[in-house]
Amino acid sequence: MNYRFFCINFIYILRWRYFVKRWQNSLLATLLTTSAVAFFSGCGSESSSDVSTAYLVDSGVKGVSYHCGTQSGITGTDGVFNYQNGQMCTFSIGETSFSVPADKLSAGKKVTPYDIFAGDDEKAINLAILLQTLDTDNNATNGIDINATAREQIQHQIEFGSNFEGNLTAAVTGSAYKNQIRTRAQALAHLATNVPAPTTYTAFERIAEIDVSAIPTSVGSNPTDQARYVARKIAKHFYMTNDTNVFSNADWVLGGAPYESNGSTKTSINPDSNVSVLDPYILEIPSPDNNKTMIVEVCNKKHAGLAMSMGAENSPALPCEISIYMDTATNKIYVDILDPVGSFAIFFNKVTENQAMLTAMALQVKTEIKLISYNALQAAAIAHVKKATPMGPKFTTDEIKGLKDQYLTYTYDINTSSSAWANETNVTKQYQLAAQAASALITKITVNNVNSGTFGINGTDLNTTLVGNADYNLSANGYWRSARLAALKVPRSSNAADDFIYTVEACSPTYAKIALSLGANGDSRNHTAALPCQMSFYIDNSDIAHPKLKIVFLNPTFMFQTLFKDMMSGTQAKGYTEQTLNAMLTTVTNDLVNMTRYVMDHNTLGWVVANPTVTAH
């Protein structure tokens, strides 16, 4: 190196530093005078009001890198991180990154995988699997800590879609984390217990949208046939697929379909050879456009048993409804559900204990129903767009606390001296008397295939039997039917092997069509899942000396005025006044009660006493 060149340049550098120093001192004085100290604090030109704090949670997630506008770092204890207001956040673990949009961020918010993958529960649960798998001590209940070793293990972008499991396994092969890979059931259960409870609830959610072009041309162009095609595929998947090892260690079943006594083995029907055999277990409800909306009802004994341990009187609200219909205006088939999170909050609002567990279970139920429905559509090769669109009326926590009279309960005293009761030598057989009562009602209001249009007592139309009857008068045009050929059998507690609740679902095509014709646009089919009229039968032997048969109805007035309240704007345009609607609700209630009273008063069971007591609650 040329020594002279080095010295000359060194002198110039010293002179340059001298002038820079003088300029900095002058600038510093100016900035201090104008209170602009933040310039030297490392925050650029932003003020403290531009930065907020939030938390990454599936329990608090520590050790994840983040970049949020001007803010970056690694999440700390409880998953804490700073973000620049109005900017999205990108998180990364090694070479895998995922982002949360700015509108999902607010000061103090707990950002969950459901926020990061809004509308795609499958990806959200896959992210939870990744976070829990990389936890340092393999115990997510005490928080998740992802250390440098775990971060270095992820050398590629892991996709959270259908190839996730293979990608994750490949990423952790050869490390201790391979033995920590969480199952979907484990990840979902843990995630559900840590997602914050909502402050507002909605009654319904759209979970999928299917363009008519996705339906095979062999199905034809009839909108009812196209909706039925999708409903059959969803019903078949719930009936035929055992999800025990995937979700919650208890299989989902199709409501009313035949199963062996163990509750999971399929029997009697074979949808693989003829999917139409599922039609008796799919409720078809006429829509305002004279097409049909399909209702698929599903149940999970583990979740049901846990819910019923909090109060059997809530049993009519338990069944999980999926509605499928074609909207000819958009040429799309919509798959909607009665949102379990909202419906549990609305109908279990009197449960004062275990609210956190109830909310977590409701979220898990909702997620499982959605994922199985998506699996059904994928297995049937039906192209679809996943949705998470809240619909229907919204309720705040305070509004929900004030709701009452969701149910009407008829309580019959059991004649313990009757031979029918006395001959039952064990509790199991006594519980079966509730099943007999439920079956008796189904027999009276439907025969053969529930979709055949044949109704009535021994095949006789109810209109000619009870319409005008002085004691059990039915409305002239109700045409009541059962949604299923058998009652839905729900365990009353997660630990009881014998104690079941038997739920009958009745439907009037006449009144259903009226309800679905409301709303400003004359179409409230996205509310269809709230239509079916549920009534549950169970034995209450809490007082062993005075056992009772309880029949709990969903209160039609409550259902309509609460879950359909957002549809009231269109009532007058349809020619309905508040008075006429209230009269219809009274008629629906009287029909349900009179049908049940008739069955109980004319039964051959020989073990109940007439003139029951009635309570609203």
Image (cartoon, rainbow, N blue to C red):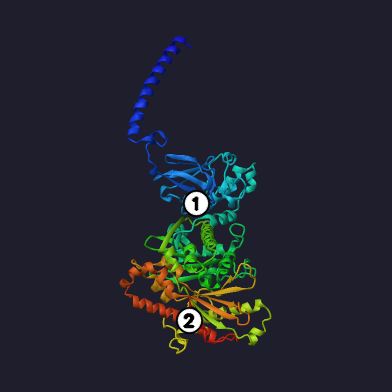
Quarter residue 501 falls in: bottom right
| Residue 94 position within the rendered picture, expressed as x and y whole percent measured from the top left | 54, 40
| Residue 453 sits above or below residue 26 on the image | below
| Residue 468 position within the rendered picture, expressed as x and y whole percent measured from the top left | 43, 88
Give the residue at mark 1. Answer: 112
| Residue 63 position within the rendered picture, expressed as x and y whole percent measured from the top left | 54, 43
**Any part of residue 261 in sight:** yes
Three-letter code, disc 1: Thr
SS under mark 1: loop
Quarter residue 577 falls in: bottom left
Q: Nearer the viewer, residue 102 or 75?
A: 75
Q: Nearer the viewer, residue 345 or 153?
A: 345
SS under mark 2: helix
Question: Would residue 267 be found to the left or right of residue 209 on screen?
Answer: right
Q: Nearer the viewer, residue 237 or 89?
A: 89
**Any part of residue 457 in sight:** no
Three-letter code, disc 2: Val
Image point (44%, 9%), residue name: 4
| Residue 65 position within the rendered picture, expressed as x and y whole percent measured from the top left | 51, 41
Give the residue at mark 2. Answer: 593
Question: Would residue 123 be found to the left or right of residue 32 on screen?
Answer: right
Image point (42%, 83%), residue name: 475
